[in-house]
Amino acid sequence: MNSMKYFLSLMIVLVLYSCGSKPQIIRKIIPVEEKGINIEKLSVSAKKDDVEITLRYMDKIELQKIAEENNPYVEGDTPLLTPFRITIRNNRNGKISFDLQNAVLLDGQGHQFQALTYESFKNLYPSTVYQQYEYSYVFERYTKQSHLTDDYYKRDKAAKTLFKGGKIYPKVTIEGILPFERLSGYVKDITLILSDIILYGEGTDTEKEDNDKILKKIEFQFKFNQKIVRLKD
C-alpha cells in the first residue's frame, strides 16, 4: 500500500514538472566598447566628419510596442529578424547620403547579411487583398467583397518604421529600423558596417558651388556581442 502511494505521488510530481512552463529565452546583443565609440544604455554612437550615428539593438519588448497586431517584426513573443534602430545626425553645412544596401552585418562565422529593404518585406508579406464571395438570396447571385489582408497591414507598418536612407540635408536628423535576417543563436561576435556614406559640397548663398559635388565617402563600424540567456519563471 505504501509503495502504491509513493508511486502515485511520484507520478503527480512528474506530471506537474512536465506541465511547468518552459524557460524563457532572451537574446541580448550588446555593443562592444572601442576607441571612438560611446556606449550609453546599450546604445552605441560614433562621430566622424560632423556626422553622428547611433545604433541600438531592438529586443522583443521594444518591437512589440510597434504594433499589437500585424507586427512585421515579431510573431507572438519571437522576433523574426535582427533589428537595430539607427539614428543619423547630419551636423554639416552640406548634404550627406546613405543607402540601405550599404549596411552589412557580419556574424563572425564567415557570413554577411545585407540590410532588408521595403522590397524584402514585400516578398515576406506578398498578399495584400483577398476576395470573399457570398450568395445573395435577394438577387439570386453571388456577390464579391474585397478585403485587405494581414500582409497588407504588416507591409504598411514596415513602410512607416523602416529607415528610409537617401539624401539627408544639413542639420537634419533621421531615424528608423535597420533590420537584418535573424542570426543563429550560436553567433557570438557581430560587426555592423555602414559603408559609402557620401559627403557633398558645402555651398553658401554667395558661392555658387555645386552642393551635390561628392567630397568624400566615409565608413562606420560597430561591434556587438550576442548572448542567449535562458530564464526560468
Image (spheres, helix red, strand yellow):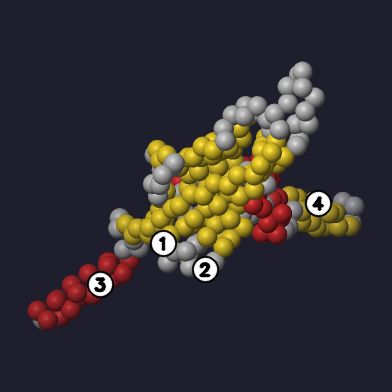
Estimate the spatial distance between the alpha carbons at disc 4 and disc 1, rounded to whole Å: 50 Å
Viewer-nearest of labels 1 and 2?
2
The residue positioned farthest toward the left in the image shown: 2
Image quadrant in which the C terminus is located: bottom left
Residue at figure coordinates x 41%, y 61% from the top left: 188
Residue annotated with mark 1: 188
Q: Of the two numbered discs 1 and 3 on the same chain, state the one appearing first in sequence.
A: 3
Q: Secondary structure at mark 2?
A: loop
Q: Secondary structure at mark 3?
A: helix
Q: Secondary structure at mark 4?
A: strand
Q: Which label sits on residue 25? A: none
The amino acid beneath tag 2 is Gly
Give neighbour class at mark 2: few <14, some 14-19, many 20+ (Cα, 10 Å): few
Q: Which label sits on residue 145? A: 4
Estimate the spatial distance between the alpha carbons at disc 1 and disc 3, rounded to whole Å: 36 Å
Viewer-nearest of labels 2 and 4?
2
Viewer-nearest of labels 4 and 1?
1
The amino acid beneath tag 3 is Leu
Residue annotated with mark 2: 110
Residue at figure coordinates x 40%, y 40% from the top left: 39
The image position of residue 160, as x and y in percent, is: 66, 41
Residue annotated with mark 3: 14
